[in-house]
């Protein structure tokens, strides 16, 4: 068996809308050199990748300027990354044979909305009223939709189905308002 690199990346879910984190979790061969490592990222709404030169074993937090989502005032202000599908490809020489590619569904913004709604519900360590119980069930369903959207994109390789679930979850979440009856 020929010595080769086993490339892999980890893209954790982060709570900061202004950061996109990527870790190199590759297993590099000790007998094959690691030449010209490159990270290519296609952000939602873009057609061509942004090329980012990196070194192997990187653990980096990127800002919106790194991906071309923000092009002005990169040193003074930070833009948020939108939720959506990011295509992330990592490669080393020879680039056509040694690469890995991922579809990553960023869910930071919708999860922040979800957790804010949970905070607004003011849950107590006791059995909820029937109205609040119905709202809790709806919130559980929304979280399942978010998780299913991520699974469709990242594991099932069905990006359009994943985005359909994401958008459905977002609409359902936006409809939930915490009136005085559900928050007490």
Image (cartoon, grey):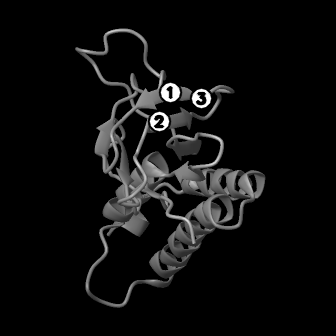
Residue depicted at 56% across the width and 44% down the height:
89
Is 148 located above or below residue 35 in the figure?
below
Is 130 located above or below residue 71 in the figure?
below
- Residue, disc 3: 49
Name the foreground residue: 130 vs 152. 152
Name the foreground residue: 153 vs 121. 153
Q: Quadrant of residue 169?
A: bottom right
Work out how far the residue at label 1 is from the one at label 2, CA to CA, in angstroms.
7 Å
Name the foreground residue: 33 vs 155. 33
Q: Are marks 1 and 2 in contact (CB under 8 Å)?
A: yes
Name the foreground residue: 182 vs 105. 105
Residue 9 drawn at (x, y percent) = 45, 55
- Residue, disc 2: 38
Q: Earlier in the sequence, mark 3 or mark 2?
A: 2
- The mark lying in front, picked from 1 and 2, is 2
The kind of secondary structure element at disc 1 is strand
Is 56 located above or below residue 182 in the figure?
above
Q: Is residue 174 visible?
A: no
Residue 161 drawn at (x, y percent) = 76, 57
- Residue, disc 1: 51
């Amino acid at each position: 068996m020929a010595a080769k690199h086993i490339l892999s990346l980890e893209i954790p879910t982060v709570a900061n809308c202004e950061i996109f984190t990527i870790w190199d979790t590759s297993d590099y061969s000790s007998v094959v050199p690691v030449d010209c490592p490159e990270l290519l990222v296609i952000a939602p709404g873009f057609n061509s990748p942004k090329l980012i030169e990196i070194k192997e074993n990187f653990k980096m937090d990127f800002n919106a300027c790194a991906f071309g989502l923000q092009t002005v005032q990169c040193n003074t202000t930070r833009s948020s990354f939108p939720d959506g599908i990011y295509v992330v490809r990592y490669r080393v020489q020879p680039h056509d044979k040694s690469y890995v590619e991922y579809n990553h569904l960023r869910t930071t913004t919708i999860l922040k909305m979800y957790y804010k709604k949970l905070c607004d519900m003011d849950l107590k360590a006791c059995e909820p009223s029937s109205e609040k119980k119905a709202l809790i069930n709806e919130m559980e369903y929304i979280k399942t939709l978010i998780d299913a959207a991520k699974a469709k994109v990242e594991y099932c390789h069905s990006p359009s189905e994943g985005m359909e679930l994401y958008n459905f979850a977002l609409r359902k979440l936006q409809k939930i308002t915490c009136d005085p009856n559900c928050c007490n």
